Each structure stands twice: as structure tokens, then as C-alpha cells.
Image (cartoon, grey):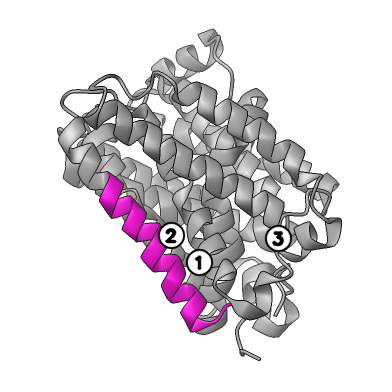
Amino acid sequence: MSEYNFSNKDLFIFFAVTFGLTIGMGIVMGFAYTKYPLDSFTLTQAYYPSIGVMTALLLNKERRKNLPMKFYGTYLFFTITSILVLLIDIYVLHKDPNAYMNMVWVIGSITLCLVYFADKKEKIYDFGLGLGKNVKASIGYILLFVVLCICGNFLSALTLGNGKKFIDAFINTKRSTGLIYFPSLCIAFLGEEYGWRYFLQPALQQRIGKRKGVILLGIIWGIWHLPINLFYYSPMTPFYSILNQLIICISYSIFFGFVYMKTENIWTVSIIHCVNNGILPILNNAVGINVVLNGKLVLANLICFCVVYLPFLFTKEYRKDEREVEFTNKL
């Protein structure tokens, strides 16, 4: 029996697969970003952390027999399909890789939702995929995040002297916050959160403590975005983009980590992640690609995100002894 929920071998496999895929496809992004839109690459990259977890657990002889194999198999199939479609579109067909990807994501997400109910309930819950855990609390935390997200971005806009522009964009927008799209994109948002929150958060917290663990997770999560920062978010100002990404990921890691410890529901943080990606373009009146950043904006985000999210690091969930916190993953 390991002293950790996830062994060092599991952790090594997770990092090797997650970052191996990210680096490999990141190189492809580097060749493609001047010729093709990269939206499909960014959403497909969200699959990789879950693939890292699933690979590690499938290679673990003790755990393999108890895994929700239908769910895992479906996820692996659509991940491989998405990667192949991207590579074929670029290197064989020489066409926009976004052409068929929306269909792949929607079909994949709907299929995953159906397969969820085909696996045995105990296997689904034993491996952190339980949908019905702490539902009432989850709804509250989702609403809390919406409020915090609006407040944090409004403070940043005020700091930069863009308060009126922010309010006008928020009032006049006709775009959705993204929540209604979650069922058709859940394969991507679950992809990140199952890797970061279900697997890596407890693995790091058990080794170095809750606060240090969640901060280190934020740094790793930020670095993982590197190809997206370089070739999609802000190719013209990559340094500021990477720095800004680290600030955002560490801040969100603190809050997402808090919510996950409180609810033990991976779907809750997946929905919050989806809401974030839907609401940020509204609040900033931007599409989030080819953004030109500067030091003033990054500093404003640093100050405002610290004000809004850093206090959660001092809540009792982070102060509790490690042994008092139960995660859904089993030994």
C-alpha cells in the first residue's frame, strides 16, 4: 500500500503523458499558427491532463480492474480522434483544422454523458467522477465564482481606468456566459479538471502540504498553457502573456482547489472552469486571441486577483490537517 493516494510512478506517468502530448502538439501549433486558426488545438489540449490520469491508472495493476472502463475508453477514443483529425487536416488535407472539430467535440461530449450512466455507479464514484456529490453546495460555489469573477475583472478595469468600458460591455453584451454550452463541451473542461483537481491536487498536497501543493499546481497549470500563450493568446507579447497566465492559474488554483475540497465534485469545478471561459470574453469585451498585453495590465491583474482569490488560501479547508481531508480517490 502506498502512503499516497497516487504513487510516485502514477505521478511520473501523468506528467510524461500530459506534458509529452502538450509539447508534441505545441510544436505542431508552432508550425501552423501563421497559416491556420488554432481554436481546435486549444480545446483539444484540454484533454491531455485527463489522458495523463487515465494512462497512469490503466497501467496500475491494482487499480485497473476497478476502473470505469467504458467512460475511460470513450474519453481515450475521442482524444485520439481529435488529435488525428487535427494532424490530417494540417499535414494531409492542408485545410483549416477547425472544420470538423466542433462536430467531434459535441459528439464526444454527448457520448461521454451517455456512457457515464453505462458504467457501474460505484466505479464512477470511486474514481472521482460522481455527479451527485454535494449538489446544493456546488450550486452555491458556482454562483460565488460568477460574483468573484465579475468583481475581480471590474477591479482590474477600474485600476486601468476602464471602468465605464467594462460596465458598458457587461450591460450591452448578448453573448452567453458559456454555462449553457457545458453539456456539449464537457469533454474538454472535465479533461483539465480531472487531471489538475482530481489527480494532481491531492498528489501534491499530500507530499508538500495543502497550501504549497495548490500553489505549485497553479504554477504547473500555468506553464502547461505555454503553447497556447505563445501561438494563440498573445503571440506579439508572449512574456506578458505567460506571466499573466501564471497569475491567473495560481489564483484560480487556490479557489478551484478550495471548491474541490469542499464539494469533492469534479463536475462542479469543471462547470466553474466553463463559466470562466465563457464570461471572461464578455467582461473584457474581447475574443481572447492575439491580445497585446503590457506590464501595467499584468500588474493590475496581479493586484486584483490577489485581493479576490488569495484570501481563500487562509480558510479552514487549507488550515486543516491533511489527515482530516478525504478525497474521493481510493487507495
37 drawn magenta: no
Residue 256 position in % (x across, y down): 58, 53
Query: Tag 1's secondary structure?
Result: helix
The type of residue carrying mark 3 is: Gly
Query: Nearest the camera: 10 or 169?
Result: 10
Where residue 218 is drawn, which disc sits there? 2
Contact between labelled residues 1 and 2, with CB atoms less than 8 Å apart: yes
Quarter holding the C terminus? Answer: bottom right
Residue segment shown in magenta: 5-25
Look at the picture and state if 124 lies above or below 303.
Answer: below
The type of residue carrying mark 2 is: Gly
The residue shown at (52%, 28%) is: 104
The residue pinned by badge 3 equals 128
The residue pinned by badge 1 equals 214
Query: Tag 2's secondary structure?
Result: helix
Residue 55 position in % (x across, y down): 52, 63
236 with respect to 80 (left or right) = left
Quarter where residue 210 is shown: bottom right
Could you tell me if residue 247 is visible in this image?
yes
